[in-house]
Amino acid sequence: MQKLDTARDLQHRLSIVLETVQQEFASLTDEQLRWKPAPDRWSIVECLQHLNLAERFYIRNIQHKVDKLGLLQTNPTDQNVESDWIGKAMLFAVDPQVKIKLPAPGMIRPRPAAELVPADVIGQFLDLQTLLRSLLDKAVYLDWNQEKVMTLFGNWLKIRLGDAFRMLIAHTERHMKQAMRVKAEMGTFASL
């Protein structure tokens, strides 16, 4: 796959995520956003907060790479984007089509829904996704195969920039589907 085509595809997928949040979740009450289908499952606001926690880490590291660009670039060079075993494993782990459930590491596990302020969580989510879109526009000037960012597992395990972008969007789509399932299940309960 080519970098510029991949960047356009990821931008399109991010637009869909932003539209979904605006259309599907913005009009819900705090009670609805905090509602859980079962005690061991996440609410919509917990799904979004998990994304905020995980993506803030990666976005900060990507922003550091983009900030190093310095001078204004005018012509991004295209390249074939390659994945190594780390990228493939991380992409598989967050793929929205994969049915395997992996527990979220403690540092990116959301606080209980009752402790979250839904408007703040949604605002942070929209801000982070908008920042990610901006970084994606600028990152096309970087080498997506050579540049690497630290993972949540530490500085000893790094992921290629191209895989990091693809993983972030896939992870977001996975939890957006989860949030949409919660919303659909919520509709079966008349009390909300």
Image: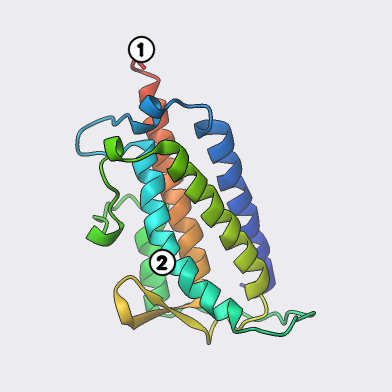
The residue identified by callout 2 is: 57
Q: Locate the N terminus and report the quarter of the image it occupies.
A: bottom right
The residue identified by callout 1 is: 190
Which element type, helix, strand or loop, lies under badge 1? Answer: loop
Q: CA distance from mark 1 to mark 2?
A: 38 Å
Asked if one can make out residue 2 in the rendered structure from this viewpoint, the answer is no
N-terminal label among 1 and 2: 2
Asked if one can make out residue 132 in the rendered structure from this viewpoint, the answer is yes
Q: Quadrant of residue 19?
A: top right
Q: Residue furthest right?
A: 74
**Closest to the observer: 101 or 154?**
154
**Closest to the observer: 41 or 57?**
57
Which element type, helix, strand or loop, lies under badge 2? Answer: helix
Residue 109 drawn above or below residue 62: above
Q: Residue at x 23, y 31 (%)?
A: 38
Amino acid found under the numbered disc labelled 2: Phe
